[in-house]
Image: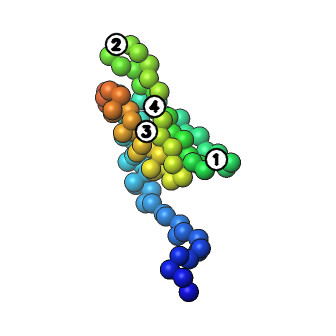
Amino acid sequence: MSIFSLSRPAVEVLPSETLDRLWAEAERLGRIEVDHSLSNRDDYRVRIRFERSSGTVVWVQGADKNIAFAISAAINEAREMGASEMPVAQ
């Protein structure tokens, strides 16, 4: 048998608290949209919309087959573009 097997990759299951934590972090940065497409290679596309202190509205995007990675990519992009955590309503 070859070391280059064509077997299917194992399904990666993340604990729900990991997704909850990522979602909460993204939510603190701005408004979140998630798109899931069955026809694209990058199945999940996550967008975060936030407003800079100058009033400029910015949309950032992360995409991946794994939703957690897509959310993480969007969070990283938002932080690189100057997003800061919004105050939590009390």
C-alpha separation, residue under disc 4 versus residue under disc 1: 19 Å
For badge 1, the amino acid type reads Asn
C-alpha separation, residue under disc 3 versus residue under disc 4: 6 Å
Residue found 41% across the figure and 15% down from its top? 56
Q: Badge 3, how many Cα within 10 Å: few under 14, some, many 20+?
A: many
**Do the numbered discs 2 and 1 sit on residues whose CB atoms are within 8 Å?**
no
**Do the numbered discs 2 and 4 sit on residues whose CB atoms are within 8 Å?**
no
Q: Is residue 19 above or below residue 12?
A: above
Kindly identify which numbered label has been placed on residue 74: 3
Residue designated by label 4: 60
Residue found 47% across the figure and 40% down from its top? 62
Where does the N terminus fall, quadrant-wise? bottom right
Q: Badge 1, how many Cα within 10 Å: few under 14, some, many 20+?
A: few
The local secondary structure at tag 4 comes to: strand
Horizontal side, residue 45 vs residue 83: left or right: right
**Do the numbered discs 3 and 4 sit on residues whose CB atoms are within 8 Å?**
yes
Kindly identify which numbered label has been placed on residue 54: 2
Residue designated by label 1: 40
